[in-house]
Image: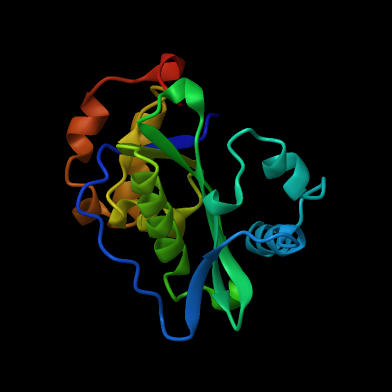
């Protein structure tokens, strides 16, 4: 079963990033590799294979310190998201990559703020739209992405019902008023960027 995909078709009129009191934002610095891995492991749980910044990020051509953002508390990174770029999708499209928040800092919308900072980074880089992938069970993340203006992007036909179930079961209709049109529309499949 393929991951769900979402798109924000334009990056116009982004709101300002306004972090909760005591938090700040910065990009990746040398030595942050373990901190990045710790955030992902705490947010997603330990995996069978250890998460490796080197394998998951550093070896990708898109990797640059300015594209990896952290929300910090007392100068310690507690949430992250990355402004990724995949050339085959075109220079106008950015990819929101690896959004995660440490469990002891959830409930403060840090995922929203760090993802919004990523969208601002895309604008700085000249991108016009943004895409991402997520999983059906990541309901808080899906709510965050909907609040950021992302909408479902159909990759496979089975996603029509999957999206309807997620939106309706969680009362997200106000965040996605165009759901019926999206579900009735074209399935983009693998021929498209995602």
Q: Nearer the viewer, residue 103 or 148?
A: 148
Residue drawn 31% across the image and 52% down it: 146
Residue drawn 60% across the image and 71% down it: 78
Residue drawn 58% across the image and 36% down it: 62
Q: Nearer the viewer, residue 158 or 49?
A: 49
Q: Nearer the viewer, residue 136 or 118?
A: 118
Residue 122, position in %: x, y?
Answer: 39, 45
Residue 7 in sight from this viewpoint: no
Does 74 sit above or below residue 180?
below
Residue drawn 52% across the image and 73% down it: 106
Residue 128 in sight from this viewpoint: yes
The N terminus - image quarter: top right
Residue farthest toward the right in the current orientation of the protein = 49
Image mark count: 0
Residue 19, position in %: x, y?
Answer: 40, 75
Does 87 sit above or below residue 51?
above
């Amino acid at each position: 079963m393929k991951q769900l995909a979402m798109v924000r078709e334009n990056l116009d009129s982004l709101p300002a990033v306004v972090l909760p009191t005591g938090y700040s934002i910065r990009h990746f610095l040398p030595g942050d590799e373990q901190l990045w891995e710790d955030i992902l492991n705490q947010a997603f749980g330990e995996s069978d294979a250890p998460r490796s910044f080197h394998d998951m990020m550093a070896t990708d051509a898109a990797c640059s310190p300015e594209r990896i953002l952290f929300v910090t508390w007392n100068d310690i990174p507690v949430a992250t998201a990355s402004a990724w770029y995949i050339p085959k999708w075109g220079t106008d499209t950015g990819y929101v990559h690896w959004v995660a928040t440490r469990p002891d800092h959830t409930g403060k919308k840090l995922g929203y703020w760090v993802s919004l900072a990523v969208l601002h980074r895309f604008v700085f880089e000249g991108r016009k739209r943004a895409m991402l992938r997520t999983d059906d069970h990541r309901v808080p993340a899906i709510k965050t992405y909907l609040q950021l203006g992302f909408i479902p992007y159909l990759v496979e036909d089975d996603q029509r019902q999957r999206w309807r179930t997620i939106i309706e079961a969680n009362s997200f209709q106000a965040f996605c008023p165009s759901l019926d049109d999206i579900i009735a529309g074209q399935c983009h499949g693998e021929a498209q960027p995602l």
